[in-house]
Image (tube, rainbow, N blue to C red):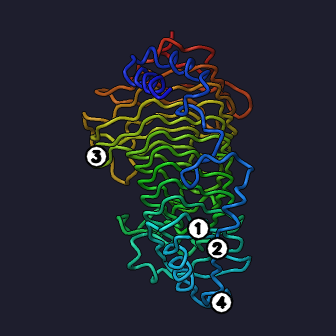
Amino acid sequence: MKKVFFVIIFTILVSSPSCFANEYQKLQNLKNVEILRRPKTSTVNNRKLTKGRINSAREASMQTVNVDDFGAKADGRTDDSQAFKKAWSKACSSSQQSRILIPNKTYYINPINFTGPCKSAIKLEIRGTIEAFPDTSLYEKSQRRWIFFEKVRNFEVYGGGTINGNGQVWWKISCKVKKTKPCNDKGAPTALTFYNCTNLRVTNLRIKNPQQMHMNFQSCENVEASKLTLTAPEKSPNTDGIHVTKTRNINITNSVIKTGDDCISIVDGSRKVHATGIVCGPGHGISIGSLGKNGAMDHVSNVFVNGATISGTTNGVRIKTWQGGSGYAKNIVFENVLMHNVTNPIIIDQNYCDQDKPCQHQKSAVQVKNVVYKNIRGTSASEVAMKFDCSRTVPCKGIVLQNVHLTGKAGGNAKAKCRNLKFDHRVSSISPRCPLMK
């Protein structure tokens, strides 16, 4: 079976763009090809556990580590960071599997790192609320992060609780709001970061009002993120919902994301990214990129978005790259997407320029190829519902459009703008249509 799997994947990667859609359709019918379908079982603690079943023997042997037992006050004034660190140290140093419990109270903590590797698997059950102190001076040494997990394996975070970044104090001093302030690398912290973690499951959590991004998965492998509710005001700057960078084999499912930036952003080094059952809006939609900034060589591949409702966003499904970069964004599928009043429902922008000064024209570009748009319908808030603004020197190629129907808000006709791209021969049942389409 492994040999068959790798033969199939190899066929996708080396086949011509005109074959990509056909191969994708064949692969959909193969139940054992995990790259195109989210597994029916969850990988936790290096085991595949059938959902809904509990290993009673392990639960009985698991120790509970309560943060209250290490001095957490949860009084709305005290910094409980040290109690959290002591609880983590106890669990991480134990050869016995542990469940760290955060009870149904409100705890305030400063920037905090939880570092592995640990001696055994850990579960973190958040029943209550974790809040950040609304004081920007506390983050001068935190390197743009608040709650940070590093080098942890076989780790599960769950519990139905809330993480509140109290980001209002950060938003009002952002360069995106305060135009006189220069934008630089020193910005607001991400609320929840997982760095270099393996076999990770994050489920049934709420994150609201982050200082900047809600969640960041960086350099992780084998991740399940599900049943998440991420919320911030529409005008809150840079509050991406789920940010994926240098991460492979991640499933994002059944989550509601309402924010001021991308609901999901997928950037360099990420592959095998699956997103299913996503409710997005307000925000900037589901984005790949930006890629290639400052001449960078960036790579993103094997991204599958299947089943999303996108409402009131500035973009729907987007790929954005800067001029002057290199690398690729390839083997991407956007399927079964419903748009409601979205300004740019479908967009590829190889001339992305998120700065005040106009970007200089450059010949090199990140290659965008083998992109499938299938079963996408809804309404556009702008006249142009479909925009492909591709590079003149490195044009988009292998673009597949099947059963795409987008109209204006009142049901009127929308337009498509297309330049410098090559469609796959499988272009059918499309509205609006590019002039390039036969």
Judged left or right of residue 357, residue 318 is right
**Which residue does the image show at 59% across and 60% down from the upper left?**
156
Marks 4 & 3, CB-CB < 8 Å contact: no
- Secondary structure under tag 3 reads loop
Marks 4 and 3, how far apart at CA: 47 Å
Q: Is residue 10 above or below residue 48?
A: above
Task: Say which residue label 2 marks.
Answer: 63
Marks 1 and 4, how far apart at CA: 25 Å
Q: Is residue 427 visible?
A: yes
Q: Nearest the camera: 246 or 98?
A: 98
Marks 1 and 2, how far apart at CA: 6 Å
Marks 1 & 2, CB-CB < 8 Å contact: yes
Give the amino acid at mark 3.
Answer: Ala
Q: Nearer the viewer, mark 1 or mark 4?
A: 1
Q: Is residue 377 above or below residue 71?
A: above
Task: Say which residue label 3 marks.
Answer: 296
Q: Nearest the camera: 129 or 85?
A: 85
On residue 73, the disc is 4
Total label count? 4
Disc 1 or 4, which lies upstream in sequence? 4
Disc 4 or 3, which lies upstream in sequence? 4
Q: Is residue 141 above or below residue 255?
A: below
Task: Say which residue label 1 marks.
Answer: 97
Q: Nearer the viewer, mark 4 or mark 2?
A: 2
Marks 1 & 3, CB-CB < 8 Å contact: no
Give the amino acid at mark 2.
Answer: Gln
Q: Nearer the viewer, mark 4 or mark 3?
A: 4
